[in-house]
Image (tube, rainbow, N blue to C red):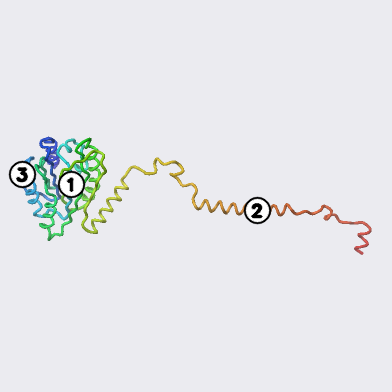
Amino acid sequence: MRLSVAATLAACSTSAQAFTDSSPFLMFSTSKFPELSQSQLQTSSSVLDSAKKILSSCPSSRYLVITQPNLNAGHLRSSDAAPKLRQALESTKIDGRFSVAEVAGSLDIKELTSYIEKACQGHNPSVDQVVLETIPTSGVSTMTVQENDDDLGIVLDQYDMEDSYTVIYTSGPRSEALAGEPKIYEAGFQDTVHMELKRHLQQVARNASPINSTTNLPLFEKYQFFTPGIFMGLVAIVVLFSILGVGVKALSSLEVSYGAFDKDVGPVAQKKQQ
């Protein structure tokens, strides 16, 4: 199995720049594939026929079709170019692999997905489509490939939890894209179950992010020191001190003469008492 995985990615590496208008095609599944041509240079029609031959038996219940615009074999040349994709290929659940390093011509993805839905109609197949960010034709493309692989890894991890699935990874229509363009990440989910999966993947991505948005904020923006509870407590203290101050002031304003407490014991006072 390891040898098969190594051969799959090595084939993409050795023929990296053979044709500028060609692209790699990867297909792997939890089910075994029939014997197919191992030629690493094929036309798009030949690859499409081979893929249909595999899919005609409906090898799984779930299908993930990944489109990476402007992809060529050179982007997978490095051993660490797509670690998440490599990890998915090396999964112990994978029993079938089909790869072509150089596919001459454009492969019709819509025709492939339509064939899955038609051929496996009786099995109610689940077909998900993911369109990754277009790899720039000028500038450094390594960063784009790495970021796409990180995003793809989240989806592949979810599929690895399933018992039956098939993944197709290929290039989409070629387009001119410059480095630094805004990222476009689209995923097509066909029903409410898929929408739940999409929301779950987004939540996983947020939880997995190592960057905290409050890390570099100032102290008084990062923490809330003056809460509503503290405010109410301060107001109550001010009111109590005001009442206490009025009471103390009232007590201090009382004036009683010292003579009021002296007892008169003279003769006149004794006569008055008699």
Image spot of residue 8 (x, y percent): 13, 41
**Residue at horizontal 23%, vertical 56%?**
194
Cα separation between marks 3 and 2: 95 Å
Amino acid under disc 2: Leu
Residue at the spot of label 1 = 67
Cα separation between marks 1 and 2: 76 Å
Residue at the spot of label 3 = 37
Residue at the spot of label 2 = 244
**Residue at horizontal 44%, vertical 41%?**
218
Image spot of residue 97 (x, y percent): 12, 45
From the viewer's perspective, is the residue at label 1 or at label 2 nearer?
Answer: 1
Determine whether, in the image, residue 143 is placed left or right of residue 60.
right
Looking at the rendered structure, which numbered label has been put on residue 81? none
Image spot of residue 79 (x, y percent): 19, 36
Q: Nearer the viewer, residue 252 or 181?
A: 181
Amino acid under disc 1: Thr
Instruction: Give the total number of marks visible in the rendering.
Output: 3
Report the quarter where the N terminus lies.
Answer: top left
Report the quarter where the C terminus lies.
Answer: bottom right
For residue 206, above or below residue 74: below
Image spot of residue 107 (x, y percent): 11, 47
Query: Which callout, 3 or 2, points at the residue further toward the start of the chain?
Result: 3
Q: Secondary structure at mark 3?
A: loop
Amino acid under disc 3: Ser
